[in-house]
Structures are given as structure tokens and as C-alpha cells.
Image: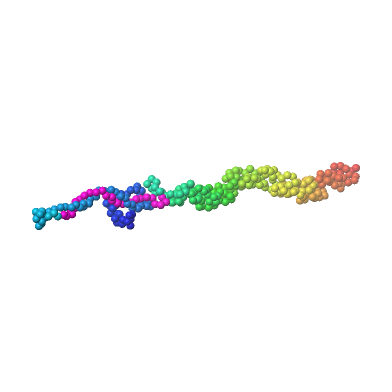
Amino acid sequence: MGAAGVSPRALLWLNLLGLIPLVSSLNPDDPNVCSHWESYAVTVQESYAHPFDQVYYTRCTDILNWFKCTRHRISYKTAYRRGVRTMYRRRSQCCPGFYESGNLCVPLCTEECAHGRCVSPDTCQCEPGWGGLDCSSGCESDFWGPHCSNRCQCRNGAKCNPITGACVCTDGYQGWRCEEPCDPSFYGKDCLLECQCLNGATCHHQTGECLCAPGYTGAFCEEPCPPGKHGSLCEQRCPCQNGGTCHHVTGACSCPAGWVGPVCAQPCSFGSFGINCSQECTCRNGGLCDHISGQCQCNAGYIGQRCSTRE
């Protein structure tokens, strides 16, 4: 049954007869528009049968009235009066949870959507990078997108853009997910800074600090190890003896004149002297040469640079 107990069929006929005007400008096809029948009163002029007493005479036996008798009868005539008629009309209004705006029914959110729009009653559709019931909360660091529903794929401490999900790499990393360190010759933010390290050193992909190759030291690895040191970080002590020096990289000993062996501990053998004991002694008459300088030490009875002169 419709409003005021009127059947749907009766309402249809009243509508066809033009007695029920459509009073709303809302589009009835809008799924968010609800309608109902309402009654209202109008003042009309209506006709009715008004009764009155009509008197007439008939013949009778009443001699005193000259054989005329009076008779009465009720007659009716058309009269007019003001009346009230109940009319019906369809009233369209926005369904619960919606309100009218520009002839449209739009959803109503009790809490205003701070960074989004209201898409259904009390339901916000958040912009990328925002979440919460009213879209007022920024995404946590591990999430992005509408309602912060997407999990970040970034690595090595990178943060993802809360709107697009793009990874913002920390210093020293590159790649779609910041999964790769900088190329060997670069470091820093976006791997754009060029390393300044020398002598085969590599720089730290985050700080640019030089990691020296064995045998070198200094801020840019520009200096060989100091005397007496060699190897990685110049931490190894040279084993060379008798004034020998070691290579700053390998630690191999370079012996001074008159000495040989891995650590320069062996003097030149008889008959040789000098660097690597490569020179041959020229002393005569049984003279002995110094293994370092090659100077002759003559036997008794001989003198001279080569012990070749008899005293």
C-alpha cells in the first residue's frame, strides 16, 4: 500500500489524471534517489444535493378548506460549498546517507575526507599516500598508494614515495629497488659523486672513503707505506735485516750491498761482494775482499788496492 493507505493502482491513476504533481527536481533514475507518496490537502468548491421542504395541494374531502389539502415532500436542488480534498504526490528525496547538491544526491561522510573524496556514506576514497578513515594519516614508511594498501619493495634502508611507490635510495645505492651498490668509481647520493682514490684503491659506495690497496696509505691512498711497514693497511712489519728495505706492497726485502737472502741475513759468499753479491772480488795473493765494499784486506807482505805489490 502507498501513502495514507492508497493502493499502488489508485496512485497510478491519480498520477495519470494529473492530480499528483512531481514536486522534486531530482532525477528519479538516480540510484541514490528515494521516493515516497505523500498526501496533502487542497480547498475545492464541490456540489451537493441540498434538501428542502416542498409544499403542494391535493384534492381531498376537507370541506372547510374547500376540498384542498396541504401536502409536503422533500426535494433536492444542486448547491455548492467549499470543501477539503486530500491529494497525493510523489516526493523524491536523497536516500539515507546522501544529500542533495545541484540536483544530485551525493554521499555524506560524517568526517570530512582530508585527502580524498567521499564515495559512499561515511566511506572515503583516499588519495595516494594517505590513509585512515578520513584520509588524514600519511602512509607509514613501508606502505604507499591509496589507503596505504601497497607494501614497499625498497631495500637497503630506502624509503618509497608514499604516492607512487618509487624507491628513494639511501646514499650509496641504486636500482629500481635500491638493491645495488654504486659502481666502483662512484659513491654517495644517487651514485653521482666520483671517487678520488688513487693507486688502485676503491671507495666506499656510501661515504666515498678510500679503501687502500695493500702497500698504500693516506686519505686518497696517495702514499706508500712508511719505511718498515707493508701490506694491507700498512700493518705488517718488515722483516728485513742489515739495513734491507721491504717492498711496501709485497714485503719482499731489497738487500743492501753485501747481503742476500729472504731477509738479508746472509753475507756474500767468499769471492763476491756488492749489490746482490753480483761483483767478483779481485784481491790477489790471498787477499780477502770486504763483502760489502769489495775492499781488499791483504795478507802479510802485500800491499796495494788489489794486494798485488810486495812490501
Is residue 279 or residue 86 the one in the foreground? Answer: 86
- Residue at the image position 41 percent from the left and 52 percent from the top: 96
Tell me the quadrant of the picture where the N terminus can be found: bottom left
Q: Could you tell me residue 152's position as x and y percent?
A: 54, 51
- Residue at the image position 90 percent from the left and 42 percent from the top: 311
Mark yes or no: residue 200 visible.
no
- Residue at the image position 34 percent from the left and 48 percent from the top: 24
Q: Could you tell me residue 60's position as x and y percent?
A: 10, 57
- Magenta stretch encompasses residue 83: yes
Is residue 146 or residue 164 the one in the foreground? Answer: 146
Q: Could you tell me residue 243's position as x and y percent?
A: 78, 46
Residues in magenta?
A: 72-98
Is residue 259 or residue 34 the one in the foreground? Answer: 34
Question: What is the total number of numbered labels drawn onto the structure image?
Answer: 0
Q: Could you tell me residue 246's position as x and y percent?
A: 74, 47
- Magenta stretch encompasses residue 237: no
Name the main secondary structure of what is drawn in magenta.
strand
- On screen, residue 161 versus residue 197, left or right, reads left
- On screen, residue 261 versus residue 107, left or right, reads right
- Please tell me whether residue 231 is drawn above or below residue 61 in the rendered image: above
Mark yes or no: residue 168 visible.
yes
